[in-house]
Amino acid sequence: MRKVTSVLLIVLLAAISLVSTGISYSQDKPFEGVNITVLTFDGPQIAEPLQRHAPEFQELTGAQVSVVTVPFADLYQIILTDQATGTYSYDAFVFAPQWMVDFANAGYLEDLTPYVEADADIQWDDIAPFFRNFSAMYNEKIYLIPLDGDFHMVYYRTDVLAEAGLEPPKTWDEYLVVAAALNGQDMNGDGEGDYGSCISKRRSAQAWQWFPSFASPFIQSLGTEQGAFFDTTTFEPLINNEGFVRALEIYKETGQYGPPDEETLDVGGTRTLFVAGRCALSLDWGDIGSLAVDPEQSIVQDKVGAVITPGSTEVIDRATGELVPCTPELCPYAVDGVNHAPVASFGGWSGGVSSGISQEKKDAAYAFFSYVAQPAQANVDVTIGKTGFNPYRISQFQDLTPWLAGGFSEKAANDYLGAIRDSLNNPNMVLDLRVPQNQRYQQVVTDPILSQFLAGEYTAEEAAQEISDQWEEITEEIGREDQLAAYIASLGIQK
Amino acid sequence: MIVSYILLLSWTFLVLFPVYWLFVTAFKLPIDVNTGPKYLMYVDFQPSDHAWREMFVASGDLVTRPYKNTAIVGFISAVLALILGSGASYALSRFTFRPKPGLVLAFVVCAVLVILMVNLEVPWQVAVAAGLGIFVLVTLTIGRRLKGSMTNDDIAFWLISQRMLPPVAVLVPIYILFQNFGLLNTYTALIVTYTAVNLPLAIWFTRDYFKSIPIELEESAFIDGASRYQVLYKIVLPLSAPGLVATFLIVLIFAWNEYTLGLFLSGADTQTMPMLVVGQNATRGPQWWNISVLVLVMIAPVVVLSIVLERFIARGILIGAVKG
Amino acid sequence: MEEPPSHLNDRSRYVLLLPAVLVVLFLSVFPLLLSIFTSLSKIRFVKGGFEIEYIGLKNYEKLLQGSGQRRFLGRFDDPTTFGWIILMVFIAVMIYWLFRYVTGPRRRLFGVLMRVITIIIAVELLWLVIRTSSGRGLPGTLVVTLIFVFGGVAAQYILGLFLALLVTQNLPGKRFFRVVFLLPMMITPVGIGFLFRMLTDTLIGPMAPMWKVAGLYNFSWVNDPATARLAVIIGDTWQWTPFVFIILLAALEGLPTETVEAALVDGANRQQMFRYILLPQIIPVSTTVILVRIIEAFKIIDMPNALTGGGPGIATESVTLHAYNLWRGIDLGTSSALAYCLLFVATFVALVFVNFIRQRLLESI
């Protein structure tokens, strides 16, 4: 009898707890019945984690998230057309933060500052300072939730360099020396000569994104706020100077130690060459790190190291445009006399919310991005290669366990994370050019001229002059004051 | 004879080798693509179905949905283009039209009026009706006084000139147009667009075939008391079947493969296959294996269709049937 | 044009023609007008819409004379002697042609005017080509497009006609060839671009061993302007020869059997058969297919975009790709202006083809 009573009691308790959890569940679903559509590009990377987290998020909050993907090359125009015509087919976007200024200036993006302030779960302070203070913000307002961290690093073959007794390069000059020394050596054991340096220089691809990594160490030395593209008082382009010309020459010289079709390779091409063991050095985002450990693609597992992008021992004197040697005043952040300026190129895929939708949808869309960005989700996602997410949170460097689970050896993980940490902690990190219509400056003007320079149609001086002139023309057309204000706002400079 | 075969076979090789390359690439692991050319399955690399699994198994309806959309949009728009186009081209090859430039202008003005009205929140049905009404009124009143001098060839040239402007220039306007009608992300938008874009082609090709049909056949049918539509349906269309089939295949292929306009007019539910192919070239460079899978899957139905339709292009079959 | 008997002009003609015209009009009037306006404006994006500021012909001025000139038209240099000779010969031929027309029986003032304008534009275009291809000159996107159009269409037509004639012979297995030859056309243009990028890759493409044997191991043929353009034309030709092929094939197959039999009974020889039976059958369709290919080829974008990205330099950038790149930088005004410049050139070439060449060919049969 006692037994029966106790069983009954347990059943009763269980039933009550079930009911109560049931009740609390429905109370916990603040967005029941809300549908939001998130637009991003065809994955699987980036789209994959969003799609994977959508059902979990619905379970938690009741909001139904559908992820729509379009080809990467047309994502920007589709967002713009959708918002500019007031169609609002999409409620939120995951896009390249460089585009943020065009969208934010036109008022298409919701100011997320109050949302972030009211949200403890996102652990905003855990996001690395560069992404938190620069990448996510414009004009002192938060418009984006970082979901990914991106900047350039130089990858090298640890085995090949060790065998030749070479150190990974600290400056671009050293890079050239290493590349020249190793070019023509067999690095994958097939008896044929391989390449010293693989950098994709294809037009209409990533070439215009690499170039700031070459030029910035010569141009920016006083921290992110100094800016590497325009003068922050006159908005004159920082192009027609010795540093830029020197960078152009280095950029071209790397081609001598590279594969013959570098000018038609995109970054996918150099990555495949690198993981196929055909390159000693390569410039890339964080992706090689996770690709190199994938046995389906790579024959260089555990033979890959990464370092912060090479720097320079000289910087330009902004008054004269001439190169002068680094001094502690000129290069306060220099390491061993070398000024590094790692470029947060692309800046990491980030989520923004449309300003033209209902408050309920905005809340749901923000909550979704917050959910994906929270350490519980993000710290696992960044270790999985196919998500395309690279580290951007401080906590992501502290625990090696998920990295080892993701297939990294301890040494590879340390090397990889070390380079990322060096770059992220560098106060002289370069923020992408974020002024209105930045695509016109970089993709429309700079990209083809870089290619024409490589093809020998311009000398370095002519190329610098031409880019500079055309940038000035665009500035005049859009309005110098407006552009300057936007540039200053993007660099977070207090007036 | 032998020379002909050698020539034909060498072109066959030139055509088939790239397709073969797609086929083997679809079964390669990334590492087999990256580490230099590998030609033969099982000989210099082990085939893998990883790309097929990624496209069809791992990602749900990633491929099947756009595939269905492509089929629906492609076939309907190709049939519509062929029906409207052959009607129009028959009319252009048998009748004389003398449209008056003034009336054309009036029509343009009316069309602009309709669009303005729609923009001013007038329901589009009302706007179109009003526009048509005004146009008819203009035609009936002052239309007769205008002097006309345009010919059939002008109409035909105007039609084909619609294809001259690159799609980038008309993307935003067409987007706005369909947005005003509330038709974005619908099959209707894609079908109407593809039909309109392909109509000029259909008209031009069928016009030539119609012209080559002896007019005496038709005249004898008229003497027997047949109506215009009966003549078209029973004599002209069967006689020009090879041309119609060829034209159908071409407009189908154009609609099947169109990318730029489709991208902007479609949404999640109506995306078509070309967008998926383009999407395989994202931030990590082209995913050759996925592209190969998608292209093979895309051409399969068109290949089957052309095998089926090929017999209709064969000489004489239909002509014999008509005579019999 | 021959006047059909008036009793055939019944009401059905409108029922047949108007639906097609209305559908095309629906999708053309508004976009055409709006994009003309766009090409005369500067566009800014603001909340919930965009601001359009009318700036007159500035966008065109920029392309033709300002900073866009170098990319659109090219870099000029003085013509070489050879260039001068070509120009002189061309002008002489044109003047002779005009003279023939003026002294001919059918001259009309309007015709003379049209021909003079045609000659002026044609000479301008040739002058542009010569100046950008001699010495330190560099062809801009317009000249590159013209190269693609004329090179590609000529290759496609010759190959397509040749294949169609081969296949219409009564060879065993011809049905196999007919289907196989259509294959390239069925592949989506972007897909073909990617395919040719795989095929032309000197490191991992199927032809890599051949390059090695030829001693071209450290050379990439898509890096040189001339060979890169050739690669684009080869890809384009591979893709579009089937288009010419199927149209011409259908025309040849549509030839009534009795006509051929009658000719054979009358004892016609091969040449006569070709001249009096085949030629009249294929010329009208040929002119159409060439016209359509010219119009389509002016819009070439996917092949250079996927194959070379427009490089090296701007060596393979077509006008459409140029306009697309501008539009990606949301420079809608200049992009539309560029599209209209292309429209002008394409219309000019198409009109010349229709009015002078097509007309002449149709009369000759």
Image (cartoon, coloured by chain):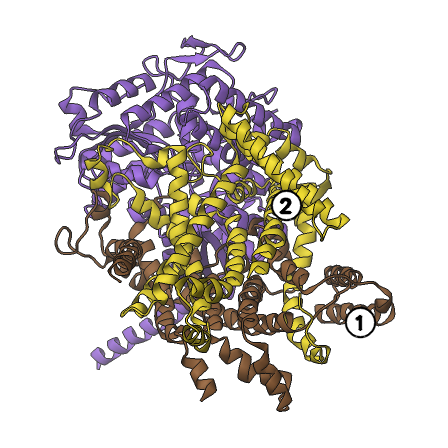
Chain colours: A purple, B brown, C yellow
- Residue A76, percent from left and from top: 51, 46
Which of the two residues, B62 or C326, is positioned nearer the viewer here? C326
Badge 2 and badge 1 in a common chain? no
- Residue A490, percent from left and from top: 54, 31
Which of the two residues, A292 or C30, is positioned nearer the viewer here? C30
- Subunit bearing disc 2: C
Image point (62%, 70%), residue name: B93
Q: Secondary structure at mark 1?
A: helix
Task: Characterize the local packing of mark 1: few (<14), some (14-19) or many (20 or more) Cα atoms within 10 angstroms.
Answer: some
- As displayed, is residue C226 above or below residue A334? below
The kind of residue on which mark 2 rests is Phe
Residue A455 horizontal side relative to residue A446, left or right: left
Q: Quadrant of the rendered structure where residue A391 is?
A: top left
Which of the two residues, C97 or A21, is positioned nearer the viewer here? C97
Does the image show residue B69?
no
Q: Which mark is residue B136?
A: 1
Q: Quadrant of the rendered structure where residue A272 is?
A: top left
* Front tag of 2 and 1: 2
- As displayed, is residue A178 above or below residue A346? above
Quarter of the figure with the C terminus of chain C:
bottom right
Pointer 2 with pointer 1, Cβ within 8 A = no
Q: Which residue does the numbered mark 2 point to in the structure image?
A: C344
Image point (83%, 67%), residue name: B143
- Residue B26, percent from left and from top: 26, 56
Residue B284 horizontal side relative to residue A470, left or right: left
Task: Characterize the local packing of mark 2: few (<14), some (14-19) or many (20 or more) Cα atoms within 10 angstroms.
Answer: some
Q: Secondary structure at mark 2?
A: helix
